[in-house]
Structure formats: C-alpha cells, structure tokens
Amino acid sequence: MGLLSLLGGSSKSLGKIIDASIAGADKLVFTPEERADYDRKLQEMHLEFVRLSANESSVRSVTRRLICLPIVYSWLGLILLSVYADALGRSMPAVTSGVEQLQPVAMLAITFYLGRHIAGTFSAGKK
C-alpha cells in the first residue's frame, strides 16, 4: 500500500524522489569545477598546516627545547647507566637514587615541552 501511495501520492514525495535521484547521479561524476574546489580546499589546508608549523620554531618553542632537553637527557643517561650497571651485576645506589629524584622533574619538563602541542590538538578537535 505504501508503494502505491508513493507512486500516486503527492507531488512533494515525487519531487523528493527526483531530487534524491539527481543528487545521487551528480555525485557519480567528478566535474572539473568540483575538482577545482577540492584542490582549493586542499591548498588552504596545506597553507594552514605550514602556518601552524612555522609557529613551532618561534622563540618560545626554542626556549622550551633548551629547558627540556638537558633535563630529559640527564634522566635518560642515568637510566641507561643504571641498566648497564645492573647488567654487570653491580649495585649503584647513587645512580638509582638520581633516577628516582630526577624522574618527577623530567616528567614536568616533558609536559612543559609537549603540553602546548597536546593542548592545541585537543582544542583543534573541538572546532
């Protein structure tokens, strides 16, 4: 019954069917105009990426790197020294203590360095 009413029904339902058919057929063909619009949007996205990545070499970003890297490298060096000493069967309590004391500082430095990037990722996802 629903099919018969659809075929012999109002002009609104027939118009919706025709519009849906035309829209479906239109999406099958990628016209040069649609290609140009797609390329323009792709270029805009690329320019936005270049603009955002250019900000990452700012003075603030370099300063964050200069603060973070020595702390993290020292912490990783102590970890490697501790693993090496453990592999040789030697106990080095000073190194183990240094790793434990430097770990919170290293985690804060990593958060300080990567925090802006992570926060930017989350805020970009909300748009």
Image (cartoon, rainbow, N blue to C red):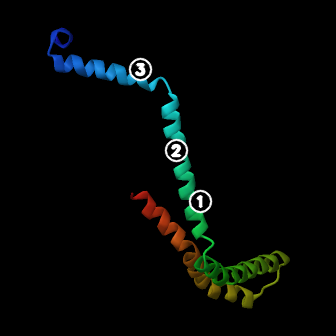
Total residue callouts = 3
Taking 108 as reference, is 119 left or right?
left
Between 65 and 87, which is closer to the camera in this rendering? Answer: 65
Classify mark 1: residues with Cα within 10 Å, few (<14), some (14-19) or many (20+). few
Residue type at tag 3: Ala
Q: Position of residue 75 (x, y in %)?
A: 69, 81
Between 74 and 22, which is closer to the camera in this rendering? Answer: 22
Residue 91 figure quarter: bottom right
What secondary structure is found at the residue carrying circle 3?
helix
Between 125 and 57, which is closer to the camera in this rendering? Answer: 57
Query: Which of pointers 1 and 2 lies earlier in the amino acid sequence?
Result: 2
Q: Position of residue 14 (x, y in %)?
A: 22, 16
What secondary structure is found at the residue carrying circle 1?
helix
Q: Position of residue 113 (x, y in %)?
A: 58, 76
Name which residue lies at 56% across and 62% down: 51
Image quarter where the C terminus lies is: bottom left
Q: CA distance from mark 3 to mark 1?
A: 37 Å
Tell me the residue that label 1 is attached to.
50
Tell me the residue that label 2 is attached to.
40
Query: Which of pointers 3 and 1 lies earlier in the amino acid sequence?
Result: 3
What secondary structure is found at the residue carrying circle 2?
helix
